[in-house]
Amino acid sequence: MTQIEYRLHAFDLASHRGFADGNMFGHLLREKWGKFAPDKRAVLVECVKRFLIPAIPRRLNTILSASHNPIRIAESETIDDVENVSIGIAEDLVLKVAAEISVLPK
């Protein structure tokens, strides 16, 4: 079975529509859990916090948003010097994070 890798890019932190408009993991979660799928935005935020933010070589001030991209940098901040930072996350790791932050049926 082929393992899918999702790429998280630092430049998405600067976009109101970054991380596929906040829907980066939507299909994967619906495919795995159907109507019991955890909140795709919460899973995205957690993955960004756990994996992308630590890979960026300087501290960023992030904010949570209720529309489109759920996590991004504050308007007053720039990421020009680190916008090329990206990391890959295996599908299984995304699903593990989703299970950890959600109450899911076995």
Image: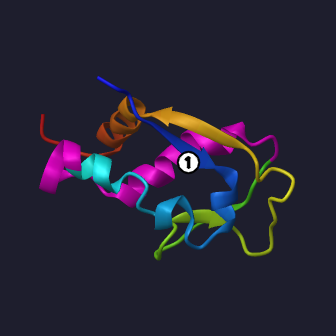
Q: Could you say where residue 19 lies in the image, as x and y percent from the top left?
A: 53, 59
- Residue nearest the observer in this picture, 62 or 56: 56
Q: Is residue 79 left or right of residue 3?
A: right
Q: Is residue 69 above or below residue 83?
A: below
Which residue lies under the disc numbered 1? 48
Q: Is residue 106 left or right of residue 28?
A: left
Residue 41 lies in the magenta-colored region: yes
Q: Residue flagged by tag 1: what amino acid is it?
A: Val
Which residue of the protein is positioned furthest toward the front in this rendering? 2
Considering the whole magenta stretch, tell me its main secondary structure.
helix
Q: Could you say where residue 71 lies in the image, as x and y percent from the top left?
A: 56, 62
Residue at horizontal 41%, vertical 31%?
Answer: 93
- Residue nearest the observer in this picture, 20 or 74: 20
Q: Residues within 10 Å of mark 1 (few under 14, many from 20)?
A: many
User: In which quadrant is the C terminus drawn?
Assistant: top left
Q: Is residue 88 left or right of residue 54?
A: left
Q: Could you say where residue 72 lies in the image, as x and y percent from the top left?
A: 62, 64
Residue range (magenta)? 31-58
Mark 1, secondary structure of its residue: helix
Q: Is residue 106 left or right of residue 10?
A: left
Which residue of the protein is positioned furthest toward the top in this rendering? 1
Residue 35 sits in quarter: bottom left
Looking at the picture, the colour scheme in use is rainbow
